[in-house]
């Protein structure tokens, strides 16, 4: 790879694995940013704000680097659905999503040092099958999606829960929209091959 150093402002294993697909040398740095929504802030606004905040949180330590920040939330009926954290919460979230459509907003920021900042959002609509209690229980026990917004892993068995996915970038649902990110990185001077 040629061009500036690349920093992923995240410790997410999912984002790290996605970025590895691009064949880039990069470093992961934990951004110290509160992910609490602001009063009245919707899902789309939240992920845009947090994506940029995460990138800027590490920018002062890497003034010559290209820094990538990203965030994702699920929204059901206008309400942000967070990461479940527990089996009981994951099962409750999947019960709520059963037979319904959930919108996932994935924000991405590409910051060149303290200078040029590109921020975008990619939305993905997931329509869930009608899920019975046994299917929910078996799925959660098998995939353990406790650290995933919406309580599923689309890169795992989560796809067995869906009727339909609508979106422009399948990687966005996993947590980092690679199609959009590639254009941003090219504009920041990153050469892939």
Image (spheres, helix red, strand yellow):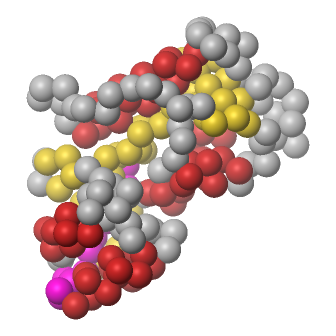
Residue positioned 18% across, 88% down in the render = 132
Q: Position of residue 31 (x, y in %)?
A: 49, 28
Query: Can you say whether 84 is above or below 120 in the image?
Result: below
Q: In front here: 177 or 30?
A: 30
Residue extending farthest bottom: 134
Q: Is residue 152 left or right of residue 41?
A: right
**114 within the magenta span:** no
| Residue range corresponding to the magenta coloring | 123-133
**125 within the magenta span:** yes
Residue positioned 26% across, 69% down in the render = 87
Residue positioned 43% across, 67% down in the render = 153
The answer to whether residue 94 shows anywhere in this view is no
Q: Position of residue 108 (x, y in %)?
A: 49, 35
Q: Position of residue 63 (x, y in %)?
A: 67, 11
Query: Can you say whether 76 is above or below 158 in the image?
Result: above
Q: Position of residue 49 (x, y in %)?
A: 35, 26
Q: In front here: 146 or 124?
A: 146
Q: Quadrant of the C terminus?
A: top right
Q: Is residue 118 left or right of residue 141?
A: right
Query: Can you say whether 61 is above or below 139 in the image?
Result: above
Q: Is residue 68 left or right of residue 85?
A: right
Q: Quadrant of residue 115?
A: top right
Q: Quadrant of residue 148?
A: bottom left
Q: Quadrant of residue 97?
A: bottom left
Q: Quadrant of the N terminus?
A: top right
Query: Can you say whether 110 is above or below 59 in the image?
Result: below
Residue positioned 48% across, 37% down in the render = 70
Q: Is residue 75 left or right of residue 67?
A: left
The answer to whether residue 3 shows anywhere in this view is yes
């Amino acid at each position: 790879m040629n061009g500036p150093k690349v920093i992923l402002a995240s410790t997410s294993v999912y984002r790290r694995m996605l970025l590895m697909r691009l064949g880039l040398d990069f470093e992961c740095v934990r951004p110290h940013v509160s992910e609490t929504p602001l009063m009245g802030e919707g899902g789309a606004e939240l992920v845009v704000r947090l994506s940029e905040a995460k990138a800027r949180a590490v920018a002062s330590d890497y003034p010559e680097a290209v820094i990538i920040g990203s965030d994702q939330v699920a929204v059901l009926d206008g309400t942000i659905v967070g990461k479940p954290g527990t089996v009981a919460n994951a099962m409750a979230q999947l019960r709520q999503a059963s037979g319904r459509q959930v919108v996932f907003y994935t924000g991405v920021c590409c910051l060149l040092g303290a200078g040029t900042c590109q921020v975008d959002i990619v939305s993905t609509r997931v329509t869930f099958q009608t899920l019975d209690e046994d299917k929910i229980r078996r799925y959660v026990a098998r995939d353990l999606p406790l650290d995933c917004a919406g309580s599923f892993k689309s890169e795992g068995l989560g796809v067995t829960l869906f009727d339909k996915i609508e979106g422009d970038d399948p990687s966005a649902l996993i947590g980092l929209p690679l199609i959009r990110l590639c254009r941003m990185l090219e504009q920041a001077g990153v050469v892939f091959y």
